[in-house]
Image (cartoon, rainbow, N blue to C red):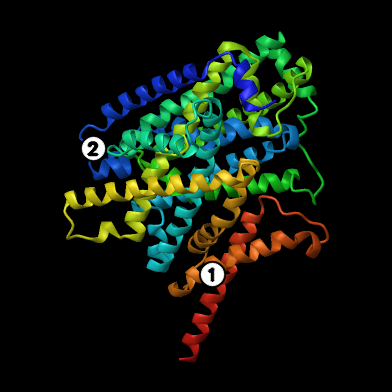
Amino acid sequence: MSIHAVLAEASISSAGILICIAGYFTALLAIAWYTSRGATNQSYFLANKSAPWLAVAIGLIGDSLSGVTFLSVPGAVGKNQFTYLPIVFGYAIGYWVIAGVLLPLYYRLQLTSIYSYLGTRFGAPAQKTGSAFFLLSRMLGAAARLYLAANVIQAFIFDQWGVPFWVTVSGIITLILIYTYKGGLKTLVWTDLFQSGFLVLGVVLSLIAIGHELGLGLGGMLETVRQSPHSDWFVDDWASPKNFWRQLLSGTFIAIVMTGLDQNSMQKNLACRSLRDAQKNICLFSLIAVVVNACFLALGALLYHYAAVKGIALPEKTDLLFPTLALGHLGMFASLVFILGLTAATFNSADSVLTTLTTSFLVDIAGMESKVGMTDEQKTNLRHSVHLAFAGILLLVILGFRALNNAAVIDLVLKMAGYTYGPLLGLFAVGLFTKWQVRARGVPMVCLASPLICWALDANSKAWLNGYVFGFELLILNGAFTMAGLWMLSHSDTQMAERQ
């Protein structure tokens, strides 16, 4: 069934969808207006170090889920079953490592950007390299997530009105700019809380709606999921990229690097009142993340079961399974729930990233904190310019993703993370767990070489490694290559010093 056929049978019109989005955005504007009053540069970067830990914990849900989870995870159940679940368990382990190892370091050094640590440990080239990999990683990840959500909105609303995709995305980014431009993190703590609430509400109410359509209570839904052919989650074949232990280990390191070594997530944790609050926030978040992701997987199993029972043809793209059934078959209630959840995913996918990209660029690349001659007004004007520039870059990257709309977006985002976050893993690991003295000028070269080596291995692993196929553990290998390169730099420096 095509998108246009689904819309023709939908319980809600394109105009009704637009009204829901407009109402949602009005609420965001009200929150932004209230929270951004009297905002300063310190408010923009760290919310004046006064963010309530519980609000931050709930707000992080939207960062970890976004449109990728909302659309891709239920649909991907048909192909991958529940093999995403071990990755989620690994996430929880990784979050506890962050709470025990990384957060104490960041708070002890009183960082605004976490990559300032790399500057302290290795020198300015390492700090700029770490920031550059974050900027690339987060820009690609945010663009992929926002693309996914915007693509569905485009198909269900604006294609019917002849509005080009670039206009739709430009409008979404403009709306995000309106409520993040002034308040920054001080505003985002509360808008993310609001949006994460709608994301969670979206999956819970969707489960209730599909259970009602199938005549199932909670016990019936649990039994249906348990007996589903899509609910297998333990794969013991070590050569398979879906192997349980490979997935668990990969999930642990993905969480460490994509949250603990990621300015976008850590900036919100650094805005808490104390280290203890930040640790409580991340530990609570680890539990919520497991439960919510399990709900999305259960939703996927129930959606496939519903389609089989009702004889509904499945869409060619698995990302469209949830919108196809929610808007075309499950009734008005499910349609409204889906639209509100997707809207939350759409705005939450990119709003905080503009603030954190701006922060990292200004602190790590431009060195704004060290420019004592700049007035507050000059710093504010520079911050506004950089914020707008990143919004423009985000738009261009999203339009580039238009050519990749046949890929499973969740796999794409995590695959990219294996290449771009690996050097960050290696840099922080060497900095935290060794006393190596590394020549700073060689760090950028090592961090560029490691992903290239991993790419070559991934492309040829079947031929070179007797049929072995890399999964998300490529991230760990990338970090290991970076560590090896840094060791060689430190070793060569030691030998040169001995000769002198």
For the N terminus, which image quadrant?
Answer: top right
| Left or right of 96, for residue 236 | right
* For residue 28, above or below residue 184: above
Q: Which of 338 and 173 is in front in this view?
A: 173
- Answer yes or no: is residue 396 visible: yes
Residue pictured at 48% horizontal, 74% vertical: 442
- Locate residue 132, reporting x and y percent: 44, 59
The picture places residue 26, in percent across and down from the top left corner, at: 35, 22
Left or right relative to 453: residue 234:
right
Say whether disc 1 or disc 2 marks the residue closer to the N-terminus. 2
Location of mark 2 (residue): 39
Crowd around label 1: few <14 · some 14–19 · many ≥20 (10 Å) = many
Percent position of residue 343, x then y: 48, 27
Label placed on residue 446: 1
| Amino acid at pointer 1 | Val
**Location of residue 18 (image quadrant):** top left
Image point 51% across, 20% down: which residue?
14
Residue drawn where x is 36% and y is 44% of the image: 355
Pick the quarter of the image with the C terminus. bottom left
Regarding mark 2 in the picture, which secondary structure is present there? loop
Foreground pick, 238 / 79: 79
Amino acid type, residue under disc 2 in the picture:
Ala
Q: In this view, does 239 lie to the left or right of 251?
A: right
